[in-house]
């Protein structure tokens, strides 16, 4: 047996960190997830403690190797030395700044859901700069993205801008921070799918392993010095090697990185222009491969980098709904509707419909294609007969309706519809939600056997980088469908639901 025949995938998400140990046949030897706290210091503010986040990764690393050892009868040491490469995928726009000397963060990480920089975004809009940012980056000026978060920390932490000027600080998204910790501070780098979510990286930027790709004009407008930004390499680059990581030997290459949604698109084997997927995680993220040419959206979507392999860049159209699985968590934790998130399916299925109840998941504002950061969640159409089951079903419909708006915008931008949509993420395991989604979209949904497509994408990228697979065709052949959801139901019912949804959106 090849002594290095395994890939260790690190999937660092919004509420927890998952590690998977996967062999070249894409068999998952073991998986382990470690959750960590979320902090909400004020309404609209969402933070992570970077040390707790890193601890969740190292704990998951230890647990996945222990689990693989127990299930296979192989010693933990033997498994560690079989790891050929590490792939990283991460929650994207979440960002932080740390000291290069001791790796101590200046502030908690500001999460992608955080809305504290809305005033700064509005100031840039008032200066008439939104069109410039949209043309150069494919993004809109919204607190969702990392640039204003980095500038906020530099402005709010005493002495931070002076320290940045002296070259003492490093900034980055979570992939960059993990890479820094995995290499004991030897490497400060990222790749284009994450860089393209900062409002600082141009769509035509080429990753050459330095800071030259960052747009100096965008950085100046955002007031982010390029000295704090990481080097940028292609997505399958050999970024560095492990050093001083608890539970891992030194010298394992980190050989593939991508933001979570781009990694999910890659993990779904959506390599051909026109291929699309939707990931139902904390939020819902729909992404369409548009090939070598970026398509500028006219309907509220984002144009973004999918991945860069060598000097070839693949672009995507993307729509993001900020609340999807988080809606189910809210019903579970705040309203105590059920004990486990999986219980929502049986509760919602206990009624034939939502009886006129509409649930708009605007708790963190509305993302694409509406871009209304001040919107809030709303439940309408309640009567004396409305019960928990009707609200639970309306919540699932609200998630599906958000995604229907995204696909309509995507179809309008592309000029043609989709025949099918691949789905993944934890909430994609909910059969009722998937059927509602297929009915509203009017197209086939395909759910793969492995729902953790973000981790699978990181595995694919790392494996390509280290030569475990020859190319996309090997990966396409490995993808397999677990279940298809064909659209059904009365179109008039779907139209009525869409009309009530549109009215509720106006009131959110």
Image: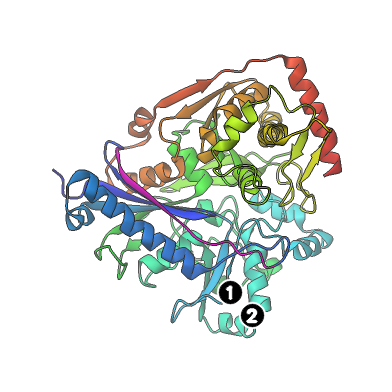
483 vs 63, nearest the viewer: 63
472 versus 115 height, above or below: above
Q: Nearer the viewer, residue 256 or 81?
A: 81
Side (left or right) of 111 relative to 51: right
Within 10 angstroms of label 2, few (less than 14), some, or many (20 or more) residues? Answer: few
Q: State if disc 1 and disc 2 touch (CB < 8 Å).
A: yes
Secondary-structure class at tag 1: loop
The quadrant in which the N terminus is found is top left
Q: Nearer the viewer, residue 219 or 277?
A: 277
* Circle nearer the N terminus (2, 1): 1
Residue 21 visible, this angle: yes
Horizontal relation, residue 256 to residue 366: left or right: left
Task: Please tell me whether residue 119 is drawn above or below residue 277 in the rendered image.
Answer: below
Residue range (magenta): 27-41
Q: How many marks?
A: 2
SS assignment at label 2: loop
Residue 345: % across, % down: 58, 32
Can residue 234 be found in the magenta stretch? no
State how far apart marks 2 and 1 are (Cα): 8 Å
- Toward which corner of the image does residue 201 lie, by quadrant? bottom right
Q: Give me the disc on residue 157.
A: 2
Residue 294 image offset from top left, x and y in percent: 60, 41
Q: Which residue is mark 1?
A: 107
């Amino acid at each position: 047996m090849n002594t290095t025949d395994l890939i260790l995938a690190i999937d660092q998400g919004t509420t927890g960190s998952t590690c998977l140990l996967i062999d070249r046949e894409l068999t998952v030897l073991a998986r382990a997830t470690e959750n960590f706290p979320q902090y909400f210091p004020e309404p609209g503010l969402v933070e992570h403690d970077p040390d707790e986040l890193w601890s969740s990764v190292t704990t998951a690393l230890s647990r996945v190797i222990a689990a693989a050892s127990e299930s296979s009868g192989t010693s933990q040491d033997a498994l560690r030395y079989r790891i050929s490469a590490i792939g990283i995928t991460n929650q994207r726009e979440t960002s932080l700044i740390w000291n290069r000397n001791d790796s101590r963060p200046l502030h908690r990480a500001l999460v992608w859901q955080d809305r504290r920089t809305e005033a700064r975004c509005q100031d840039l809009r008032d200066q008439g700069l939104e069109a410039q940012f949209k043309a150069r980056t494919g993004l809109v000026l919204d607190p969702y993205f990392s640039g204003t978060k980095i500038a906020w920390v530099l402005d709010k932490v005493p002495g931070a801008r002076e320290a940045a000027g002296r070259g003492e600080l490093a900034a980055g998204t979570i992939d960059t921070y993990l890479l820094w910790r995995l290499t004991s501070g030897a490497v400060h780098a990222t790749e284009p799918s994450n860089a393209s979510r900062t409002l600082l990286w141009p769509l035509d930027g080429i990753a050459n392993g330095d800071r030259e790709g960052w747009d100096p004009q965008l950085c100046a407008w955002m007031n982010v010095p390029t000295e704090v930004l990481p080097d940028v390499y292609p997505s399958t680059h050999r970024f560095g090697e492990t050093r001083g990581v608890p539970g891992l030997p030194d010298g394992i290459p980190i050989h593939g990185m991508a933001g979570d949604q781009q990694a999910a698109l890659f993990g779904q084997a959506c390599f051909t222009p026109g291929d699309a997927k939707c990931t139902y995680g904390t939020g819902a993220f729909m992404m369409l491969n548009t090939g070598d040419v970026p398509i500028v959206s006219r309907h509220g979507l984002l144009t973004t980098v999918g991945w860069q392999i060598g000097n070839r860049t693949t672009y995507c159209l993307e729509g993001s709904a900020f609340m999807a699985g988080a809606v189910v968590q809210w019903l579970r934790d705040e309203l105590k509707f059920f004990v486990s998130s999986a219980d929502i399916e049986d509760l919602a299925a206990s009624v034939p419909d939502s009886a006129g109840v509409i649930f708009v998941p605007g708790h963190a504002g509305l993302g694409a294609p509406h871009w209304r950061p001040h919107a809030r969640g709303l439940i309408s159409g309640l009567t004396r007969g409305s019960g928990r089951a009707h609200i639970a079903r309306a919540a699932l419909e609200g998630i599906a309706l958000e995604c229907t708006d995204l696909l309509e915008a995507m179809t309008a931008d592309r000029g043609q519809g989709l025949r099918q949509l691949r789905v993944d993420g934890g909430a994609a395991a909910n059969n009722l939600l998937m059927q509602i989604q297929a009915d509203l979209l009017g197209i086939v949904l395909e759910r793969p056997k492995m729902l953790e497509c973000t981790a699978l994408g990181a595995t694919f990228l790392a494996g390509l980088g280290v030569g475990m697979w020859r190319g996309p065709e090997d990966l396409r052949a490995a993808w397999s469908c677990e279940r298809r959801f064909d659209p059904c139901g009365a179109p008039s019912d779907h139209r009525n639901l869409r009309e009530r949804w549109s009215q509720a959106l106006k009131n959110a």
